[in-house]
């Protein structure tokens, strides 16, 4: 896959891993209209290669993403586990606004606007206070 086919918000991290010899096969910058709310990279390899990927990401933060979760996954195909594969999930970048609106894409409708509105309404509800719960 060429770099031009990568989401711009994750391209730097993917290119870094590829330069370190990590075989990536899926990535996403996250946010509205994407497969995940958080940025992630999926790759194949051993436990040692997964640790190598995490180390590469931690020691070169120039792309602006911070690792949040490393998960080993097996895909089930016709009932049989295939893998393992790794998924490295990142916190949204510091310059992204809740809910993960990337800089330069302010025209996007926020990813979780309805959910966030419900959370905000619940936090200020009299029911919460009546049950002894503090407002957010």
Image (spheres, helix red, strand yellow):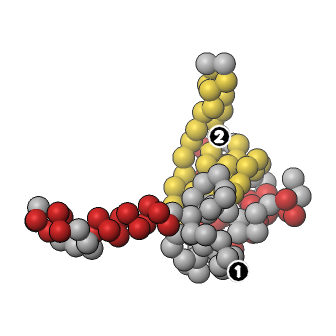
Query: Is any part of residue 53 visible from this angle?
Result: no
Residue at 65% across, 71% down = 108
Answer left or right for 122 relative to 30. Answer: left
Residue 63 place in picture, x, y as percent: 69, 74
Q: Could you say whether the residue bearing mark 1 is in a helix, strand or loop?
A: loop
Q: Is residue 66 above or below residue 81?
A: below
Displayed quadrant of residue 72: top right
Q: Earlier in the sequence, mark 1 or mark 2?
A: 2
Q: Quadrant of the C terminus?
A: bottom left
- Disc 1: CA contacts within 10 A as few (<14), some (14-19) or many (>=20): few
Residue at 11% across, 61% down = 131
- Disc 2: CA contacts within 10 A as few (<14), some (14-19) or many (>=20): some
Residue 122 place in picture, x, y as percent: 29, 65
Query: Which residue is most to the top?
Result: 79
Q: Could you say whether the residue bearing mark 2 is in a helix, strand or loop?
A: strand
Query: Is any part of residue 43 visible from this angle?
Result: yes
**Residue closest to the eye, 16 or 31:** 31
Displayed quadrant of residue 54: bottom right
Residue 74 place in picture, x, y as percent: 60, 33
Residue 87 place in picture, x, y as percent: 61, 49
**Residue closest to the eye, 67 or 92:** 92
The answer to whether the residues at label 1 and label 2 have Cβ atoms under 8 Å apart is no
Query: What residue sits right under mark 2 in the picture?
Result: 85
Displayed quadrant of residue 93: bottom right
Q: Is residue 94 above or below residue 110?
A: below
Q: Is residue 63 above or below residue 16?
A: below
Residue at mark 1 to residue at mark 2: CA–CA distance: 32 Å
Q: Which mark is residue 104?
A: 1
Answer left or right for 17 relative to 96. Answer: right
């Amino acid at each position: 896959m060429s770099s031009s086919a990568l989401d711009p918000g994750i391209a730097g991290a993917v290119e870094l891993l590829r330069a370190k010899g990590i075989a990536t096969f899926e990535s996403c910058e996250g946010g509205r209209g994407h497969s995940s709310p958080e940025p992630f990279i999926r790759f194949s390899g051993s436990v040692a290669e997964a640790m190598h990927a995490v180390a590469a990401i931690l020691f070169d933060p120039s792309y602006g993403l911070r690792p949040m979760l490393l998960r080993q996954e097996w895909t089930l195909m016709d009932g049989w586990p295939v893998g393992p594969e790794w998924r490295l999930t990142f916190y949204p970048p510091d310059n992204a606004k809740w809910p993960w609106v990337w800089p330069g894409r302010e025209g996007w409708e926020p990813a979780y606007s309805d959910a966030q509105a419900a959370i905000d309404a619940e936090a200020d509800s009299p029911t919460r206070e009546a049950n002894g719960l503090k407002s957010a």
